[in-house]
Image (cartoon, helix red, strand yellow):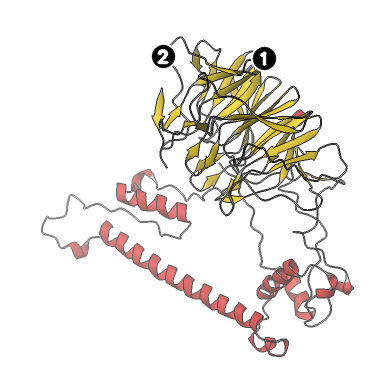
């Protein structure tokens, strides 16, 4: 079964009040100084995660690359970046070293530019299969890198090979390479829900035909994992829709796994999926066109239920206004306006719905009655006035800030608003930009007894020599992953087409 291809609740972020107390106001009238930061905000720290610090020059940002492990070395090939296009770079990193450094491996013969491909390690070889080699051009070629002779070798394509394919997902199982889904390019141009098995010894592919017609819809960007000879699949996209369905395949029959929608992960594609012990772990992915995720979900295979370990923090929860009472239910149009105002965070007056009393005569003037339409129009007019006033105030503050920062020190005093709130905002801006003690603001008296200033944005978390413990990755999709010992290693990916080149590890024993 194939499909055509076509072209991304949340944690609330606590707001910090900029309005000082009376005691602070009195103190700031006497001394104009910056309050040094004595502690770090630990709200976003997560002991399960660590960022691996790259020493020396880092590699280019990229997404849709592929990584694998061999003898404590992390290998990476290819990837895509909007500005650089599809890459053909080959790197490795020693994960046992006290200093993480990328080493570029250059060879005359190589697979060439490759993205949305799959890579794995089998015996003393690193295999690469499929992927895009040019914009909208995919391939079904396979290469392997001989780790003994340090040479790239192209496998001979035979009739058992699948069509040109990209954005598929793959996993090693029982000396075979299992591939699911993807998009068949070339003359096919369809999404796939096929399962293929590659035999490394014979260089042949075999399509695993299910014995019934029941199967997941064709898709790419899905996640798969193996547990006790059962293949599990979650999510993906068919170009029009994204999914959050969970299936299992015993290589004979597909079975849909119905679960409660209470903790069901959001629809997504381009996510991480793996099995650890009796748990399926899912991280990240893209939920909507501009909504990447950073949530962590676990499916307990014994209890057959989803558990949300970490909520998605990529977007704030919309503030919900009070619901109208039963006696004053709004009509359909008013409810749409109410939801719209809630989503956009605008301030809107509650509109009372009034009805004509049955005692009133039909010819009675409308001016004597309270019209819901008129109230709605008046509320919209009031909202417009408030929006215009707010824009004007923002523009005035913006101009005031520009005046402060554009003129020289001798003229700043005549433009500066010396209110405590403005002073705190101004000091915060200088603190972020000038965290060193020798760059203190020189207004009024010196900073608090000349103590060195430390910006909370620059102060590190618990730091080891080669990693930052407690730092978790931001929301993303298209990130590559592999497992090293008891750690899930994640590299790169992108968010709103902004690529990353960071590396994170997740301690699987803490889930």
Residue 107 position within the rendered picture, expressed as x and y whole percent measured from the top left: 71, 40
| Secondary structure at numbered mark 1 | loop
Number of numbered discs visible in the structure rendering: 2
What residue do we see at 73% from left, 33% from top?
Answer: 151
Report the front residue among 323 and 245.
Answer: 245
Q: Residues within 10 Å of mark 2 (few under 14, many from 20)?
A: few
145 on left or right of 450: left
Q: Is residue 64 visible?
A: yes
**Upstream in sequence: badge 2 or badge 1:** 1
Q: Is residue 417 something that shows in the picture?
A: no
Q: Quadrant of residue 467?
A: top right
Residue 123 in the image: state x and y as whole percent: 74, 22
Q: Residue at x 43, y 37 (%)?
A: 239
Residue on which the image places disc 1: 174
On screen, residue 149 versus residue 173, left or right, reads: right
Determine the CA span between mark 2 and mark 1: 26 Å
Foreground of the two, 290 or 395: 290
Name which residue lies at 83% across and 47% down.
462
Q: Position of residue 114 (x, y in %)?
A: 59, 39
* Relative to 15, 373 lies left or right: left
**Residue positioned 79% across, 34% down in the render:** 73
Residue 87: percent from the left, percent from the top? 62, 45
Q: What is the quadrant of the N terminus in the image?
A: top left
Query: In the rendered view, does 272 fall on the left or right side of 254?
Result: right
Vertical order, 129 against 64 (above or below)? above
Q: Residue furthest front?
A: 108
Numbered disc in front, either 2 or 1:
1
Mark 2: which secondary structure? loop
Where is mark 2, residue-wise?
A: 213
């Amino acid at each position: 079964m194939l499909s055509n291809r076509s072209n991304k609740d949340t944690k609330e972020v606590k707001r910090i009040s900029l309005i000082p107390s009376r005691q602070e106001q009195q103190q700031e009238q006497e001394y104009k100084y910056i309050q040094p930061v004595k502690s770090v905000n630990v709200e976003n720290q997560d002991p399960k995660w660590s960022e691996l610090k790259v020493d020396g020059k880092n590699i280019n940002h990229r997404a849709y690359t592929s990584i694998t492990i061999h003898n404590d070395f992390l290998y990476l090939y290819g990837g895509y970046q909007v500005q650089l296009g599809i890459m053909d770079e080959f790197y490795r990193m020693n994960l046992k070293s006290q200093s993480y450094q990328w080493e570029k491996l250059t060879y005359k013969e190589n697979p060439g530019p490759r993205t949305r491909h799959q890579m794995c390690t089998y015996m003393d070889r690193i295999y690469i299969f499929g992927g895009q080699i040019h914009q909208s051009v995919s391939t079904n070629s396979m290469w392997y890198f001989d780790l003994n002779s340090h040479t790239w070798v192209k496998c001979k394509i035979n009739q058992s090979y699948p069509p040109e394919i990209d954005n598929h997902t793959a996993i090693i199982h029982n000396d075979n390479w299992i591939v699911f889904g993807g998009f068949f390019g070339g003359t096919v141009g369809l999404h796939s829900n096929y399962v293929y098995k590659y035999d490394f010894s014979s260089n042949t592919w075999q399509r695993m035909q299910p014995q019934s017609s029941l199967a997941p819809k064709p898709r790419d960007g899905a996640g798969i994992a193996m547990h006790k000879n059962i293949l599990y699949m979650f999510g993906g996209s068919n170009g029009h829709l994204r999914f959050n369905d969970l299936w299992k395949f015993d290589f004979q029959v597909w079975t849909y796994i119905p679960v409660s929608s209470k903790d069901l992960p959001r629809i997504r594609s381009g996510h991480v999926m793996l099995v650890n012990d009796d748990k399926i772990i899912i991280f990240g992915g893209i939920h909507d066109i501009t909504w990447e995720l950073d949530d962590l979900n676990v499916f307990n295979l014994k209890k057959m239920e989803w558990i949300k370990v970490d909520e998605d923090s990529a977007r704030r929860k919309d503030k919900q206004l009070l619901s109208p009472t039963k006696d004053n239910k709004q009509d359909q149009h008013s409810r749409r306006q109410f939801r719209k105002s809630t989503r956009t965070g605008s301030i809107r007056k509650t509109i009372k719905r009034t009805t004509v009393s049955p005692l009133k005569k039909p010819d009675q003037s409308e001016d004597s009655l309270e019209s819901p339409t008129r109230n709605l129009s008046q509320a919209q007019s009031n909202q417009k006035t408030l929006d215009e006033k707010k824009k004007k105030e923002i523009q005035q503050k913006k101009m005031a800030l520009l005046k402060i920062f554009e003129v020289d020190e001798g003229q700043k005093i005549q433009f500066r608003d010396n209110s405590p709130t403005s002073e705190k905002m101004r000091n915060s801006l200088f603190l972020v930009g000038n965290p060193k003690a020798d760059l203190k603001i020189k207004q009024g008296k010196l900073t608090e007894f000349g103590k060195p200033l430390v910006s909370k944005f620059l102060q590190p978390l618990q730091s080891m020599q080669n990693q930052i413990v407690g730092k978790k990755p931001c929301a993303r999709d298209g990130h590559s992953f592999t497992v090293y010992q008891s750690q899930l290693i994640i590299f790169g990916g992108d968010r709103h087409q902004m690529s990353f080149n960071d590396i994170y590890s997740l301690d699987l024993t803490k889930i």
